[in-house]
């Protein structure tokens, strides 16, 4: 179960191009798995914020040539 959308990730960050949107979609799903493994009972708002931050950091790192 995803806790954020592409639009959530873009809000307060920047518009994502088509390729970044595809990557973000996969990362959103991965973030949900990680979050559920450590904080399944966390509030939905917290899960959304954590998801957005995880995805934004990964995309920013990739843009700088760092591994995701």
Image: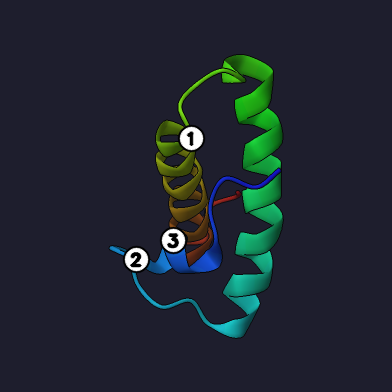
- Residue beneath the point at 58% across and 72% down: 20
Q: Residues within 10 Å of mark 3 (few under 14, many from 20)?
A: some
Report helix, strand or loop for mark 2.
loop
Sooner in the amino-acid sequence: mark 1 or mark 3: 3
- Outermost residue toward the left in this view: 12
**Which numbered dot is residue 44?**
1
Residue in front for this viewpoint, 7 or 22: 7
Report helix, strand or loop for mark 1.
helix
Q: Which residue is mark 2?
A: 11
Indicate left or right for 7 with 20 as reference: left
Q: Residues within 10 Å of mark 2 (few under 14, many from 20)?
A: few
Q: Are marks 3 and 2 in contact (CB under 8 Å)?
A: yes
- x then y, percent, for residue 28: 62, 51
Report helix, strand or loop for mark 3.
helix
- x then y, percent, for residue 6: 53, 66
Q: Which residue is mark 3?
A: 8
Residue in front for this viewpoint, 23 or 40: 40
- x then y, percent, for residue 24: 60, 62
- Residue beneath the point at 44% across and 54% down: 56
């Amino acid at each position: 179960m995803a806790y954020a959308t592409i639009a959530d990730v873009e809000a307060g960050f920047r518009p994502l191009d088509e390729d970044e949107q595809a990557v973000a979609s996969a990362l959103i799903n991965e973030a949900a798995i990680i979050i559920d493994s450590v904080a399944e009972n966390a509030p939905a708002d917290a899960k959304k914020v954590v998801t957005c931050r995880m995805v934004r950091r990964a995309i920013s790192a990739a843009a700088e040539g760092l591994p995701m």
